[in-house]
Amino acid sequence: MGSRPKKSKKRSAAKLLERVVFFIDRSLGKHDVPSALRAAGCHCELHDEHFKQDTEDEVWLRELASRRWVVITKDEKIRYRPLELQALRSAALRVFIVICGNLTGAATADVILKAMPRILATLNSRRGPFVCHVYKDGTVKLK
């Protein structure tokens, strides 16, 4: 009897990508980042498709708990504000904060796409809540 073939990491990453929904925070815009991620096969939902522009962060963070979406944002301060931090923890959210300064939307999308294998590996190996930083070189670090 032969042994079962090993699943390739590429195949399991592709399966995970099919199941994950990325919530693109308004800080990342409506066009460049979501368009690039969708072109790469990511399922994206935009902040403004579900919430008013002025919806407080703690409100939409709590709402995302039931949806199990993965948050991508540029708002570095979100993990320091008490209400947002409490909402993030109670919702067991998985959050990736892109640390890229004043890059264009297209350049920010490139950073996220470069980091996507590490983002998927993190999602595959950890449950929420957690916050990771995504850096310009594609590095992903748990904070």
Image (cartoon, grey):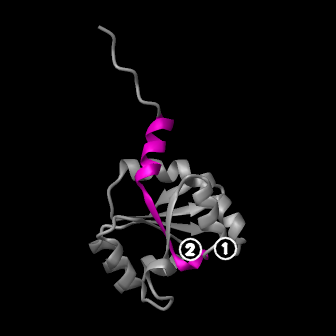
Q: Residues within 10 Å of mark 1 (few under 14, many from 20)?
A: few
Q: Kindly indicate the quadrant of the structure image that contains residue 115.
A: bottom right
Q: Nearer the viewer, mark 2 or mark 1?
A: 2
Secondary-structure class at tag 2: loop
Residue ID at (44%, 61%): 21
Label 1, secondary structure: give it. Answer: loop
Q: Residue at image x 32%, y 56%?
A: 127
Q: Which residue is mark 2?
A: 74
**Residue at image x 33%, y 10%?**
2
Viewer-proximal residue, 119 or 59? 59
Amino acid beneath label 2: Lys
Q: Which residue is mark 1?
A: 101
Magenta region: which residues?
9-29
Find out whether residue 18 is within the magenta segment: yes
- In the image, residue 124 lies at what x, y percent? 39, 48
Q: What amino acid type is highlighted by mark number 1?
A: Gly
Whole-percent x and y of residue 104? 72, 71
User: Mark 2 and mark 1: span between their CA atoms?
Assistant: 9 Å
Residue 11 located within the stretch drawn in magenta: yes
